Amino acid sequence: MKIFNTLTMRKEEFVPIEPGKIRMYVCGPTVYNFIHIGNARPMIVFDTFRRYMEHKGYDVNYVSNFTDVDDKIIKEAIEEKCTANEIAEKYIAECKKDMAGMNIEPATTNPRATHEIDGMIDMISKLIEEGHAYVKNGTVYFSTRSFPGYGKLSGKNLDDLRSGFREIKVTGEEEKNDPLDFVLWKPKKEGEPFWESPWSEGRPGWHIECSVMAKRYLGDTIDIHAGGEDLVFPHHENEIAQSECANHAPFAHYWMHNAFLNINGVKMSKSLGNFFTVRDISKEYDLEVLRFFMLSAHYRTTLNFSRELMEAAKTSLDRIHRAASRLEDIAEHADKREMSDEERKVLDGAKAFIAKFDEKMDDDCNTADAEAVVFDLVRYANTNVADNAPAALAQGVLDVLTELCGILGIHALKKEKSLDADIEALIEKRQAARKARDFATADKIRDDLLKQGIELMDTREGVKWKRV
């Protein structure tokens, strides 16, 4: 498999540190509100990458953090008149609901910054001892000049950055030795959460958190570090500097970054009124549609979000569901006879789509082309699996479709939500009317349910329903 490595700006053959195992760290959200669809893209993309690597037989140790102490969290706590921890707890729970809706596999570990403070103090202390950090009035700064490799991920040059740096007017910032030095630890302000440290009662800077959590759960050197392209500089650049100075080892061999998400061609912004949370989208669409849409473009290309494109994704996903449902129906009710030689060839032809799918995913996780392979399989199944096909053929083709969809995190067979009790009661009332040959009442109930998005189908096995 080849991965585009941001560190080298080229596609490289992926070679793990330890054969058969992958250590992967993905920067998670800051939990001060519901996650937005920009947060969702890296979650979906790198969850799919993980699923694919597991499909290839790798044991993936997948770590994704929650930043649960931050200025935005503290601001939200003040507004809601509660503690920062209560805000973090609330929105971690809400984030996990949204992740489940998008079918994100739980991470091997979801560390929280506030649970790793001791490790951060230890790493900061080591950086001070080795001359990579210094203390000024209770604040600890990392000295960017102490790390010769600073800028190797982003391609930024320290001298160029410094020459373009504006005059610092923020109180306290003028005490830095260099304007490009960044905070590792800062003293508390009135009413803020804080922890004891050798330098002050305070809290860690953002960048040190990920360095420490990656080290603890994955080791000094990891295979893959991933996140949105907005994190390349300064966050990931600073992570490299801290980690490599503290650990005396390369931090990550491969860096993967997904591109931005635009709304109707414009950058998402609350001020422009085009800001959408995942929870907003869930009120209108099944979140599986959002996932399918997110994977319809290569992760390194800017993705444009619009209602029209979401509707197109919904229609495409429905095509897959219909094809899978048909195969399931044939498998359940068809003849159990042995397949003919010709039918075995049809099944072998379906299995060949797995290699085609793998070829696309091996090319830097190209989910857009992988989705196209799934649609080719759907067309193949619709054309080559007849309604009177043997159960073994239908089930075999369905198994292939289910496997490929599963790698994308999509259910080939639509998971119907349970019906409300009053809807169930209406269906039972209709059944009773049909039994009594009161077809006028039965038809009216069927039409009323259709208006509510529930389609009833009378089959030999009884009444079935689906959402439309």
Image (spheres, rainbow, N blue to C red):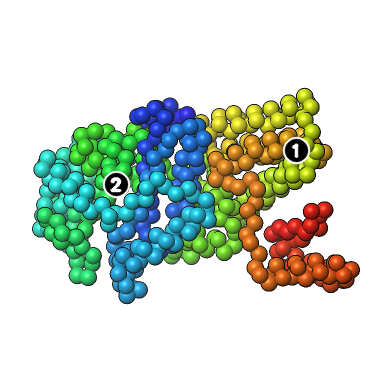
What residue do we see at 29% from left, 38% from top?
219
Could you tell whether 192 is left or right of 32 in the image?
A: left
Could you tell whether 439 is left or right of 344 in the image?
A: right
What residue do we see at 54% from left, 50% from top?
291
Which residue is farthest right? 437
Residue 167: x and y in percent read 20, 55
Compare residues 31 and 400 and report the one nearer the observer: 400
What residue do we see at 21% from left, 58% from top?
203
The CA span between labels 1 and 2 is 50 Å
> Can residue 367 be seen in this snapshot?
yes
What residue do we see at 55% from left, 31% from top?
358
Q: Residues within 10 Å of mark 1 (few under 14, many from 20)?
A: many
Q: Residues within 10 Å of mark 2 (few under 14, many from 20)?
A: many
Residue 337: x and y in percent read 79, 33
Tell me the quarter of the picture where residue 432 sits: bottom right
Could you tell whether 383 is left or right of 173 in the image?
A: right
Res. 213 mark: 2
Q: Earlier in the sequence, mark 1 or mark 2?
A: 2
Residue 84: x and y in percent read 30, 66
Compare residues 331 and 385 and report the one nearer the observer: 331
Res. 136 mark: none
Judged from the image, the secondary structure of the residue bearing numbered disc 2 is helix
The amino acid type found where label 2 is placed reads Met
Residue 94: x and y in percent read 44, 62
The amino acid type found where label 1 is placed reads Ala
Quadrant placement of the C terminus: bottom right
Compare residues 332 and 458 and report the one nearer the observer: 332
Residue hosting label 1:
391
